[in-house]
Image: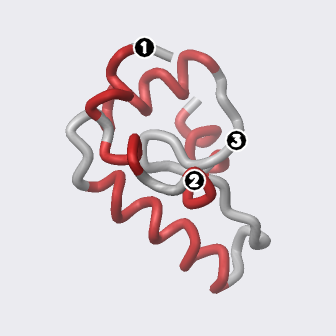
Amino acid sequence: MSDFRLSALCAGADPEIWFPTAVPGTEVYDREVGRAKAICAGCPVRARCLDWALATADDFGMLGGLDPSERRALK
């Protein structure tokens, strides 16, 4: 991963936040994802993170403010 992560708001956050454990489509999942999205929303490198996730086809966790299914929809 490139240097952009050093400027990311997630750099100091608990890694568990980025990997929801609940079933997609449930209220619990929405809450879990909502916490990550709130951090991503204000991140200065969100667009670069999303570009990286799409370029590498990373299909796990929250990246660039999107969950895996949202990223797949962009392809």
Distance from label 1 to label 2 (Cα)? 18 Å
Image coords of residue 4 (percent x, y):
33, 22
| Position above or below: 40 against 50 | below
Residue type marked 2: Trp
Residue type marked 3: Phe
Quick check: marks 1 and 3 in contact, CB under 8 Å? no
Q: Earlier in the sequence, mark 1 or mark 2?
A: 1
| Position above or below: 53 against 34 | above
Image coords of residue 47 (percent x, y):
31, 32
Q: Earlier in the sequence, mark 3 or mark 2?
A: 2
* Crowd around label 2: few <14 · some 14–19 · many ≥20 (10 Å): many
Q: Earlier in the sequence, mark 1 or mark 3?
A: 1
* Crowd around label 1: few <14 · some 14–19 · many ≥20 (10 Å): few
Residue to which mark 1 is pinned: 2
73 horizontally vs 1: left or right: right
Quick check: marks 3 and 2 in contact, CB under 8 Å? no
Residue that appears at 54% across and 16% down: 55
Q: Residue 31 carries which label?
A: none
Residue to which mark 2 is pinned: 18
Distance from label 1 to label 3 (Cα)? 18 Å
| Position above or below: 66 against 5 | below
Image coords of residue 40 (percent x, y):
35, 52
Residue that appears at 29% across and 55% down: 41
